[in-house]
Amino acid sequence: MTVVLAIDGPGGAGKGTVSKRLAESLDWHLLDSGALYRLVGIAARKRNLDLSNVTQLAEIARNLGVQFRVAEAGELVQTWLEGEQIDHLLRTEKAGSDASVVAAIPEVRAALLQRQRDFAVPPGLVADGRDMGTVVFPDAHLKVFLTASVEERAHRRYKQLKEQGLSANLRALREELEARARRDSERAAAPLKPAPDAWVLDTTGIGIDEVVAMIRERLDGVLSSRESK
Ligand code: C5P
């Protein structure tokens, strides 16, 4: 069975960066599950669909024509949806909030379940999301739940957006992150919460390098105890 490291938590807790860094250093696959929900929202908007249209949203999720391509320079991954490169739309707060609306629909979640599980191929998978440890990979070898105070999460997201040349307003970001975490935690389908066997790591005041090192140390412990069995 492929080794899976599940990393869950609210937006802005550092999951994306931490997961990417760990996947790169381990040379493992990476599942950015949030991107799938963002893509469903983007595809729905492109078709001028109402985000409450459950039947059509589930249909979009089942047939999502998405490709993640490595750019020519090597590293950068490009996201193509139905023949169009949509990276400029993917990371906006609008795409994030649309994603959290479509992600509350059980039929959409069910349609994306197998697609996510298919990412678990050797040598290993780092899975980043909200329900990686609870629903998608309940048997993951290590489950981490990353959190941070809402102030810190808003600051991190602000910095990230600015670095990408996107516009951002700190107060609006904080409100949006709070609303999104509330919607994600209170929904009936796969709510955002730590798995009972997850390691809850509050990263408030801890730099990203240290967080990566802490998780790597714990993962190495898990991997070596597996090998010695
Ligand atoms: O992680 P990211 O910010 O890209 O996720 C966008 C939204 O997608 C989240 O706010 C959440 O509502 C939804 N999501 C989810 N389950 C996942 C990943 C993301 O419900 N595994």
Image (cartoon, rainbow, N blue to C red):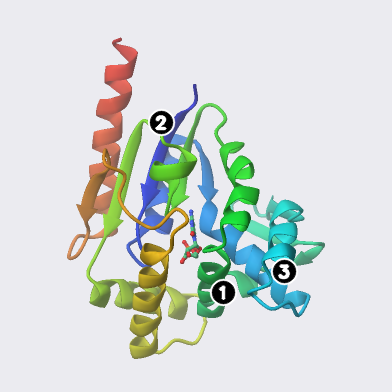
Q: What residue is rendered at 64% in x and 70% in y?
A: 41
Toward which corner of the image does residue 113 lie, by quadrant?
top right
Q: Does 86 appear above or below 162?
A: above
Mark 1 falls on what kind of element?
helix
10 Å crowding of disc 1: few (<14), some (14-19), many (20+): many
Q: How many marks?
A: 3
Q: Which residue is mark 2?
A: 139
Q: Which residue is mark 1?
A: 98
The kind of residue tagged 2 is: Asp
Alpha carbon distance from label 1 to label 3 = 11 Å
Query: Going by the picture, which residue comes out furthest to the right?
Result: 83
10 Å crowding of disc 3: few (<14), some (14-19), many (20+): some
Whether the residue carrying mark 3 lies under 8 Å from ligand 1 is answered with: no
Q: Quadrant of the C terminus?
A: top left
Mark 2 falls on what kind of element?
loop
Q: Which residue is mark 3?
A: 43
Mark 3 falls on what kind of element?
helix
Whether the residue carrying mark 1 lies under 8 Å from ligand 1 is answered with: no
Q: What residue is rendered at 50% in x and 68% in y?
A: 100
Alpha carbon distance from label 3 to label 2 = 31 Å
Alpha carbon distance from label 1 to label 2 = 29 Å
Q: What residue is rendered at 73% in x and 56% in y?
A: 64
